[in-house]
Image (spheres, rainbow, N blue to C red):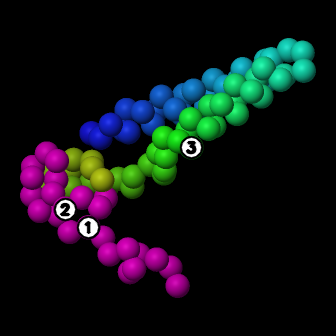
């Protein structure tokens, strides 16, 4: 597990809560807008990017990153999929 694996669910949960907060905010909603703008700047700064693609180990079935070259459970050598061949024409 990388440091961003635990951070991603926290960020997603806070995104949902901020959207809920903005919907419930009374008055002109300026406080909610300011808070959401600050949150967006923090998320951009963290540069989490998209979640990694996951796949199963063909030997033991453990789920791991699709681009992995070794299984995290059984340590067998894996061949990552060829990205060029996987793209549709």
Report how far apart the C-alphas of labels 3 and 2 lie in the structure.
Answer: 29 Å
Q: Name the residue under label 2.
A: 69
Q: Name the residue under label 1.
A: 80
Whether tag 2 and tag 1 are in contact, CB under 8 A, the answer is yes
Residue at image location 38% in from the left, 74% down from the top: 83
Magenta-colored segment: predominant secondary structure: loop
Q: At which x and y percent is residue 48?
A: 47, 45
Residues in magenta, as a range: 66-89
In the rendered image, the vertical position of residue 42 relative to residue 67, given as above or below: above
Q: How crowded is mark 3: few (under 14 residues within 10 Å), some or many (20 or more)?
A: few
Q: How crowded is mark 2: few (under 14 residues within 10 Å), some or many (20 or more)?
A: few
Q: At which x and y percent is residue 9?
A: 46, 32
User: From the viewer's perspective, is 87 left or right of 24?
Assistant: left
In the rendered image, the vertical position of residue 47 relative to residue 32, given as above or below: below
Quadrant of residue 58 in the image? bottom left
Whether tag 3 and tag 1 are in contact, CB under 8 A, the answer is no
User: From the viewer's perspective, is 38 left or right of 82?
Assistant: right
Disc 2 element: loop
In the rendered image, the vertical position of residue 55 relative to residue 85, given as above or below: above
Q: At which x and y percent is residue 81?
A: 30, 70
User: From the viewer's perspective, is 76 left or right of 7?
Assistant: left
Disc 3 element: helix
Whether tag 3 and tag 2 are in contact, CB under 8 A, the answer is no
Q: Can residue 8 be seen in this view?
A: yes
Q: How crowded is mark 1: few (under 14 residues within 10 Å), some or many (20 or more)?
A: few
Report how far apart the C-alphas of labels 3 and 1 lie in the structure.
Answer: 29 Å
Q: Name the residue under label 3.
A: 44
* In magenta stretch: residue 5: no
Report how far apart the C-alphas of labels 2 and 1 lie in the structure.
Answer: 6 Å
Q: Can residue 58 be seen in this view?
A: no
Q: Which of 35 and 8 is in front in this view?
A: 35
Residue at image location 77% in from the left, 28% down from the top: 33
């Amino acid at each position: 597990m990388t440091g961003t694996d635990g951070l991603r669910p926290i960020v997603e949960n806070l995104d949902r809560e901020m959207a809920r907060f903005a919907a419930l905010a009374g008055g002109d909603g300026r406080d909610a807008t300011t808070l959401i703008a600050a949150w967006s700047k923090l998320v951009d700064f963290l540069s989490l990017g998209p979640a990694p693609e996951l796949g199963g180990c063909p030997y033991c079935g453990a789920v791991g990153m699709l681009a992995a070259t070794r299984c995290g459970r059984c340590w067998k050598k894996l061949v990552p999929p060829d990205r060029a061949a996987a793209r549709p024409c």
